[in-house]
């Protein structure tokens, strides 16, 4: 039988004088090694002030068969290796919940040590101009992310659980929305958001196959993919070249009596003209999905992006504003859309019980659905053709820690944007991305577009920067319509476009972006500015 959790009396040697010792309760926290030694935590009942040291206090009630009559303090750092032969007097055994607490505390302390020894030095590595790689993005984390992750993995709940619930609640609070659904990627969030609009529960507002959805071609493919996957028709509108978002003057031209929705992203954190798009949607009774994957933390007219439309989506893939490795979310204030998204995220089921919970409705075996026999188990009643897009609770745990630091990430992104802007604004050859009027962007990247007729190409500049260890990115697909995925698509049938998308092509040819993520210091920013100016000859 395992010794772990048993408490013995042991003569603990004094640190300053190993010849002397005192009897102390010690808690066994490991199995025996081959030499017969065990790891123990030395406890004390003395009134030493442990407030500055991580510790747990256990009452005699938490110790089964307890022979101790006082509370016992176990400082987590007081770990020693003792020989099993020295442990003769057993004074109790910690109950399961107390044991869980202390074993967790020991693991989490070790996790912190791991972070401090392995990750922190990497993160604090001095920037050496020209030698250090300037990534366009990256995870920014500390011991808290790792501790929450280990905490969750020790619980071994694995699927949607306590951290997931906490994350959804905290993100809802941050965005000031009623409901958030955690999913396994930004692409899944877009899939869920779009498919929610195809639910028959929406009656005459349901998006049907063949209906049209207004979008843009300059951006990320999975903003558009769900529209095509379902069999609706994307209608591509051009971009404007000041704020690099949808050209709202083209919205009316894009509309037909089949138009049911607008689904677009806020480019690199810069809000699109929400006022114009929202007015257009309201006027024609259209759904608005805001792909907020690159804009978490941005506001428009003081209100967060992603919360203006009917549904907003986020991505938590590592380069994004915050990460959980793989992850995403949808959010809404609309009670019907929340009901649909819950169902579609979780297999299409009608039941809303959480994982591992039964009969939340109290009527599990007494309701009638479709043509099923009355009382058919509600847990297995399906109201949609759904997906399973949930994340593991371990991913959510990382997300909770990231959300705690999130406001500081947004602040740093804004500061880095300003520094880059100030350092490059006088270069005549460039169009720099301007913040949308009335907005306060939480920038994802710093986009540069070459003016027409400039004597060098975007790729020449990108290659120069890459050679100098500065990572660059195009605006994702550039013009999605020019990619092989459109080879089998027929214009006018499978998709439509308004005009020739000239500005979209310009972005494809002449735009690129560099990073400004919160892990980037002033030295990296100055280096980027210097190299860009060097290339341009200024
Ligand atoms: C605007 C936009 N939407 C959606 C996504 C997809 O997110 P994910 O990579 O989490 O699937 C991305 C990814 O970078 C994106 O930039």
Image: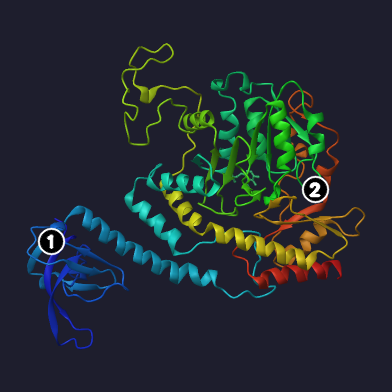
In this rendering, the answer to whether 304 lies above or below 202 is: below
Q: Quadrant of the N terminus?
A: bottom left
In the image: residue 127, left or right of residue 240: left
The residue shown at (21%, 62%) is: 31
Instruction: For ligand 1, give the image quadrant.
Output: top right
**Whole-percent x, y for residue 108 in the image:** 35, 62
Measure the C-alpha gap from mark 2 to mark 1: 70 Å
- Give the mark nearer the N terminus: 2 vs 1: 1
Residue at which label 1 appears: 60
In the image: residue 130, left or right of residue 116: right
The image's mark for residue 507 is 2
* Label 2 element class: helix
**Whole-percent x, y for residue 263 in the image:** 67, 35
In this rendering, the answer to whether 304 lies above or below 74 is: above
Q: Mark 2 or mark 1: which is in front?
A: 1
In this rendering, the answer to whether 528 lies above or below 101 is: below
Q: How many marks?
A: 2
Q: Is mark 2 within 8 Å of ligand 1?
A: no
- Residue 463 appears in view: yes
In the image: residue 326, left or right of residue 211: left
**Whole-percent x, y for residue 475 in the image:** 73, 49
* Label 1 element class: helix
**Whole-percent x, y for residue 509 in the image:** 82, 49
The residue shown at (66%, 38%) is: 223
- Residue 39 appears in view: no
Nearest the camera: 495 or 273?
273
The image's mark for residue 253 is none
For label 2, the crowd category at 10 Å Cα-Cα, with few meaning under 14, some 14 to 19 and many 20 or more, is many
The residue shown at (49%, 70%) is: 120
For label 1, the crowd category at 10 Å Cα-Cα, with few meaning under 14, some 14 to 19 and many 20 or more, is some
In the image: residue 367, left or right of residue 21: right
């Amino acid at each position: 039988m395992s010794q772990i959790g048993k408490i013995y009396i042991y003569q603990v040697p004094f640190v300053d004088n190993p010849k002397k010792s005192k009897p102390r309760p010690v808690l066994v926290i490991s199995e025996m090694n081959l030499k017969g030694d065990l790891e123990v935590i030395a406890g004390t009942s003395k009134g030493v002030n442990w407030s500055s040291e991580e510790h747990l206090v256990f009452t005699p009630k938490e110790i089964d068969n307890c022979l101790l009559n006082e509370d016992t303090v176990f400082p987590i750092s007081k770990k020693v290796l003792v020989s099993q032969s020295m442990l003769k007097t057993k004074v109790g055994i910690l109950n399961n919940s107390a044991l869980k607490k202390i074993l967790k505390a020991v693991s989490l302390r070790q996790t912190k040590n791991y972070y401090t020894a392995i990750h922190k030095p990497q993160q604090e590595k001095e920037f050496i101009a020209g030698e250090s790689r300037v990534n366009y993005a990256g995870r920014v984390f500390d011991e808290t992310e790792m501790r929450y992750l280990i905490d969750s993995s020790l619980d071994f709940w694995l699927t949607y659980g306590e951290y997931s619930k906490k994350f959804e609640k905290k993100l809802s609070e941050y965005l000031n929305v009623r409901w958030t659904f955690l999913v396994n990627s930004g692409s899944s969030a877009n899939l869920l958001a779009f498919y929610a609009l195809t639910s028959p529960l929406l009656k005459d507002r349901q998006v049907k196959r063949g209906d049209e959805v207004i979008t843009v071609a300059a951006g990320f493919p999975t903003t558009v993919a769900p529209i095509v996957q379902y069999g609706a028709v994307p209608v591509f509108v051009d971009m404007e070249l000041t704020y690099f978002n949808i050209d709202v003057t083209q919205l009316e031209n894009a509309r037909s009596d089949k138009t049911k929705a607008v689904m677009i992203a806020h480019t690199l954190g810069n809000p699109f003209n929400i006022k114009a798009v929202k007015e257009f949607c309201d006027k024609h009774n259209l759904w608005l999905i805001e792909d907020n994957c690159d804009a978490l933390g941005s506001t428009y007219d003081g209100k967060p992006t992603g919360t203006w439309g009917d549904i907003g989506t986020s991505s938590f893939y590592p380069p994004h504003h915050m990460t959980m490795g793989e992850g995403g979310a949808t959010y809404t204030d609309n009670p019907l859309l929340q009901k649909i998204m819950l169902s579609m995220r979780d297999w299409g089921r009608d039941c809303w019980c959480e994982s591992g919970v039964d009969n939340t409705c109290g009527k599990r075996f007494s309701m009638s659905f479709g043509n099923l026999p009355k009382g058919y188990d509600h847990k297995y009643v399906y109201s949609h053709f759904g997906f399973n897009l949930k994340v593991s609770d371990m991913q959510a745990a990382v997300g909770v820690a990231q959300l705690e630091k999130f406001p500081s990430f947004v602040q740093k992104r804004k500061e880095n944007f300003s520094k880059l802007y100030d350092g490059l604004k006088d270069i005549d050859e460039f169009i720099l991305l301007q913040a949308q009027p009335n907005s306060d962007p939480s920038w994802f990247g710093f986009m540069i577009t070459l003016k027409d007729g400039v004597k060098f190409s975007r790729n020449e500049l990108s290659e120069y920067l890459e050679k100098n260890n500065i990572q660059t990115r195009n605006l994702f697909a550039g013009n999605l319509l020019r990619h092989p995925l459109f080879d089998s698509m027929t214009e006018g049938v499978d998709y439509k476009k308004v005009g020739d998308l000239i500005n979209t092509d310009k972005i494809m040819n002449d735009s690129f972006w560099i990073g400004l993520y919160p892990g980037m210091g002033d030295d990296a920013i100055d280096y980027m500015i210097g190299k860009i100016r060097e290339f341009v000859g200024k």
